[in-house]
Image (spheres, grey):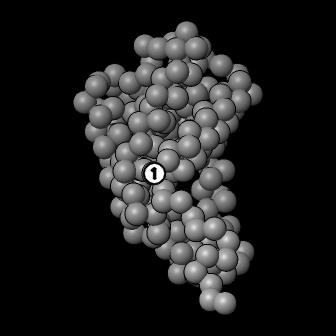
């Protein structure tokens, strides 16, 4: 299985080369959750970082499953999610040092190696995810890229709603200023 994940990461593998096993999906989801939670809690000022990581993993799974159902291939959900959760975990680990360096800049973020590195990782994530969808959906690369972008945007939008629901409201401008 490790060889298949490496092949997926290098755009040579297919999600259907992974075993279709519920335990494998849950293990990959748990790995993604733990890594995302640790990264989120390590550097974010968000007090509910671990909860948000859990919600994001769940939303991602639902959105991917919906994409597979709408494309008529729901039977491929285990392998597809195993691949995507595993890739997410690896990329989150790779991004961790750059996130740490960015958060140490304390609001004065400048374009440097950190942003360049995260941009490259983001583009690689988009590419790998599109490749996974291309195989999972038996689709053209263009359609797979469209599904990838729609899935990612849907997750981001839903997470914005969740964050706004769990985050304490910001004080009004000028609140707390003397005078």
In the image, residue 58 above or below residue 103: above
Residue 128, image x, y percentages: 58, 40
User: According to the image, label 1 marks what residue?
Assistant: 166
Residue found at the very far bottom of the displayed protein = 179
Tell me what residue is drawn at x 36 percent, y 61 percent: 38
Q: From the image, which quarter does the C terminus lie in? A: bottom right
Question: Residue 170, located in which quarter of the rendered image?
Answer: bottom right
Tally of numbered tags: 1
Residue 75, image x, y percentages: 43, 13
In the image, residue 139 above or below residue 61: above
Relative depth, front residue between 101 and 175? 175
Question: Residue 154, located in which quarter of the rendered image?
Answer: top right
Tell me what residue is drawn at x 53 percent, y 60 percent: 169
Give the left or right position of residue 153, taking residue 20 as reference: right
Tell me what residue is drawn at x 66 percent, y 32 percent: 150
Task: Rate crowding at label 1 as few (under 14), some (14 to 19) or many (20 or more) other CA atoms within 10 Å.
Answer: few
Tell me what residue is drawn at x 53 percent, y 81 percent: 104
Residue 67, image x, y percentages: 56, 22
In the image, residue 134 above or below residue 92: above
In the image, residue 83 above or below residue 31: above
Q: Secondary structure at mark 1?
A: helix
Res. 83 in view: no
Res. 22 in view: yes
Relative depth, front residue between 49 and 21? 49
Residue found at the very far top of the displayed protein = 72
Q: From the image, which quarter does the N terminus lie in? A: top left
Give the left or right position of residue 157, taking residue 73 as reference: right
Residue found at the very far front of the displayed protein = 179
Residue found at the very far left of the displayed protein = 23
Residue 7, image x, y percentages: 48, 40
């Amino acid at each position: 299985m490790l060889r298949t994940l490496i092949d997926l990461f290098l755009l040579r593998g297919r999600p259907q080369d992974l075993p279709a096993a519920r335990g494998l999906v849950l293990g990959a989801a748990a790995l993604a959750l733990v890594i995302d939670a640790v990264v989120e809690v390590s550097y974010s000022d968000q007090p509910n970082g671990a909860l948000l990581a859990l919600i994001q993993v769940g939303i991602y799974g639902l959105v991917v499953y919906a994409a597979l159902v709408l494309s008529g291939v729901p039977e491929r959900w285990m392998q597809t999610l195993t691949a995507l959760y595993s890739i997410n975990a690896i990329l989150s680990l790779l991004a961790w040092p750059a996130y740490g360096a960015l958060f140490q800049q304390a609001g004065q973020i400048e374009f440097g190696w950190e942003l360049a590195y995260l941009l490259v990782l983001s583009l690689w994530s988009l590419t790998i995810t599109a490749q996974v969808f291309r195989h999972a959906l038996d689709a053209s690369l263009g359609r797979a890229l469209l599904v990838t972008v729609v899935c990612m945007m849907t997750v981001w939008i839903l997470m914005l709603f969740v964050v706004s629901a769990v985050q304490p409201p910001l004080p009004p401008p000028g609140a707390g200023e003397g005078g």
